[in-house]
Amino acid sequence: MRDRKRNGSFYTPKIIADFLVDYLSNKLKERSSISILEPSAGDGVFVKTIFYHNSLSPKVKKFVAVEKNLQELEKITIDIKKKVFSAIHSDFLEYQKNNVSKFSLVIGNPPYIRKRLLMESQVELCKSIHDQANLADIRPINIWTAFLVRCIKFTNYRGILALVLPSELLQVKFAGELRSLILKEFERVEIFTFNELLFKDCKGQDTLILIGERKSENKGIYYCNINKLTDLSVGKYTLAQNINVKDSKWTHHHLETEEIELLERLKQRLNTINYYCSSKAGIVTAANDFFIVDAKTVEEYSLQTFIKPIIQKGIFVNGSVVFTSDEYQELINKSKPAFLLALDKNSAIRRNAKIWDYLEIGKERKIDKRYKTSLRKNWFEIPNIGPAPEAFFFKRCNEYPKFIKNEAGVLSTDSAYIVSMRDNFEIENMIFSFYNSLTLAYSELYGRYYGGGVLELTPNEFKIVPIPYVNLGENEFKGFTNSFRNKISIKEICRMNDVKILRTIDSNIDMVTIDKIFAIREKLFLRRVKTN
């Protein structure tokens, strides 16, 4: 399993290959001859499916399959003995350097390998491919991006691109330029997303099929969400055109066009979060497990005058929208790390031998040699500590985002964004207003998700989430807080809040519309957590 992860070798299920080849045969039915490139042949599922296909196989005049793993390539050549078939033993990144041929069809499942697992030569080749495509940021995050860019260029003037790709293409900021490139190069783009994981042994990696046609009578971008893989075999799917592709992300392809239009119509009437408050990342310690300590460590090394109260991570404030002094004390009583070591060269640390004993532990663990600590004048001085914020927004979550009033007056690590309200706006109103189906739906759309269904919003994504700001009456926030403390589900919270909050956007919004928005949030949430 480790080797497969390192090599990105998660092979395409046959049901996907069968569907894709059959589907593409209809797009190519008017052509008398075709040429095909498979940039990462793997176990040969696409090669075999194409050559065994009754209507597509006779049209193939040239088929080039590139594969780095010689054993896998030899298995393919045993099965496929055709004069038009060329099996190339090479890393695709190397192959593409000296090959300029164009193909009718480029089809495959590029490897998924993060930068840290790539060889330096591969990183440089990825950079070169990105640079030739005029991408502003040429640094590779993952090898699949270079495969995608180069495969686009391998398609001829009427060519078709058909790739199995990670859903990161729809979501993350670094793929924004790739999405723009796809729309620039292809007149018709089709995206198939799935409610099932295609690769069961690659838990958490959501996948899609991207099809791009350089020439098409029916131009535009189309999407389809497949509920079950078996639906492909029986043709149980419908492509719908999505006219809303202006956003930098394509996550909204999981929604129907009328759902997108409803959200967009309401969004146009709203300000975003950064209109009401400022936000920035919390404290970067560079080593939380050293610089954030528990009460026992404070006592042992006489750190009492050199600490500040801090929340290390969101799990310590689960189930609440207010963090109180009593709750902070409870963390201390449970021996949780709750104190930030805030040292500077002008403090009394020079007269405290025990502190130097503790710092020596850090040096033994080579914390002073870490990248961020090595940039500091004194490795143990944490910069930009600042005052306690009004509230925290934790950037990662499972069931729902955590927006929390800081009644305890503590600091936070960069696991949260620290929030300060602008003049004339109140934090209680802000937090209450955040918890409605529309704002939570946009949090799902703007964020990205990781294995296990974890949602993350970057600082910029958090700032642009639309919110209908509501002024609360006396004691309303207390009642709202009690709902969370009583472990009421986020669905119930939305049911209680939606009417009051959403009708501030438009007093004529009816319950049918409110129910639709509620259903959209639930749909996006369930799609995210399905990988659990």
Image (tube, helix red, strand yellow):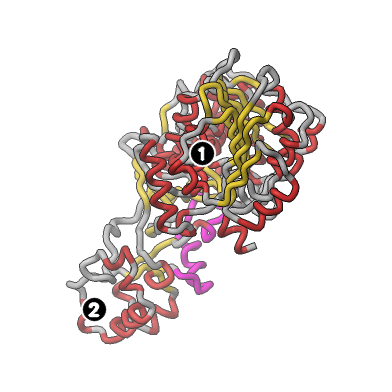
Nearer to us in this view, 361 or 521: 361
Q: Earlier in the sequence, mark 2 or mark 1?
A: 1
Is residue 473 rendered to the left or right of residue 136? right
Residue 349: which disc?
A: 2
Is residue 12 rendered to the left or right of residue 365? right
**Around disc 2, counting alpha carbons within 10 Å, would you say few (fewer than 14), some (14 to 19), or many (20 or more)?**
some
Q: Position of residue 66 (x, y in %)?
A: 58, 46
> Which residue is farthest top?
217
Residue 148: which disc?
A: 1
**Around disc 1, counting alpha carbons within 10 Å, would you say few (fewer than 14), some (14 to 19), or many (20 or more)?**
many
Q: Position of residue 217 (x, y in %)?
A: 59, 13
Q: Residue at x 44, y 74 (%)?
A: 294
> Magenta span covers which residues?
315-337
Q: Is residue 367 above or below residue 430?
A: below
Q: Is residue 276 magenta?
A: no
Residue 453: which disc?
A: none
Q: Are marks 2 and 1 in contact (CB under 8 Å)?
A: no
